[in-house]
Amino acid sequence: MKVLTIKQPFATLIAEGIKEYEFRTWKTKYRGEFLIHAGKSIDKKAMKKFKQYHLEYPTGCIIAKATLTDCVRIDDNVKKELQNKNPLVYARAINDIYWDGYGFKLENVEKIEPIYASGKLSFWEYEMEE
């Protein structure tokens, strides 16, 4: 199954259903189910920002399954939409006027028991045990 490694706290925010878009500088044509891997690297500034959620932020493990339903260019209209949706979560993508990239729309997010694995760049494959 395809997997995408995401820094903490963003991987957990997705797993908890708080963050609906994952931002990348590259676009993808892939649509469908994939696993969310919480990478070993942590965005310390963001961790402080989301401390109020009182969540656990495991690292180095697969923590959720999601469906990638769309890949949208982050233009001014999308920034405005995200600002209205959740300014705390989307502030970085919204406020950085120079940031140029894409948002992967995530739906049907489901937390799973952590599966420890090493992450990789871009989408990568993981063999799920039956």
Image (cartoon, rainbow, N blue to C red):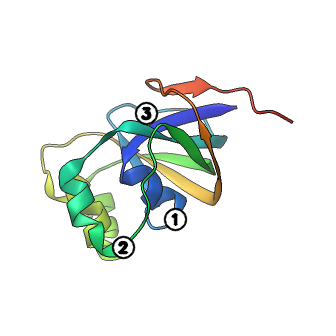
The amino acid marked with disc number 3 is Lys
The amino acid marked with disc number 1 is Glu
Tell me the residue at 51%/35% (across/down): 4
Q: Marks 1 and 3: which is nearer the front?
A: 1
* Side (left or right) of 27 relative to 3: left
Q: Earlier in the sequence, mark 2 or mark 1?
A: 1
Residue 124 in the image: x percent, y percent?
57, 24
Residue 72 in the image: x percent, y percent?
43, 47
Residue 50 in view in this figure: yes
Disc assigned to residue 16: 1
For the residues labelled 2 and 1, say whether their Cβ atoms are less than 8 Å apart: yes
Closer to the camera, 75 or 53? 53
For the residues labelled 3 and 2, say whether their Cβ atoms are less than 8 Å apart: no
Residue 11 in the image: x percent, y percent?
45, 50
Tell me the quadrant of the picture where the C terminus can be found: top right
Q: Earlier in the sequence, mark 3 or mark 2?
A: 3
* Side (left or right) of 52 relative to 64: left
Residue position marked by numbered label 3 in the rendering: 27
* Side (left or right) of 125 relative to 47: right
* Side (left or right) of 47 relative to 18: left
- Badge 3 density bin: few <14, some 14–19, many ≥20, Cα 10 Å: some
The amino acid marked with disc number 2 is Tyr
Residue 27 in the image: x percent, y percent?
43, 33
Q: Earlier in the sequence, mark 1 or mark 3?
A: 1
Task: Give the quadrant of residue 109.
Answer: bottom right
Instruction: Name above or below for residue 18 compared with residue 101.
Output: below
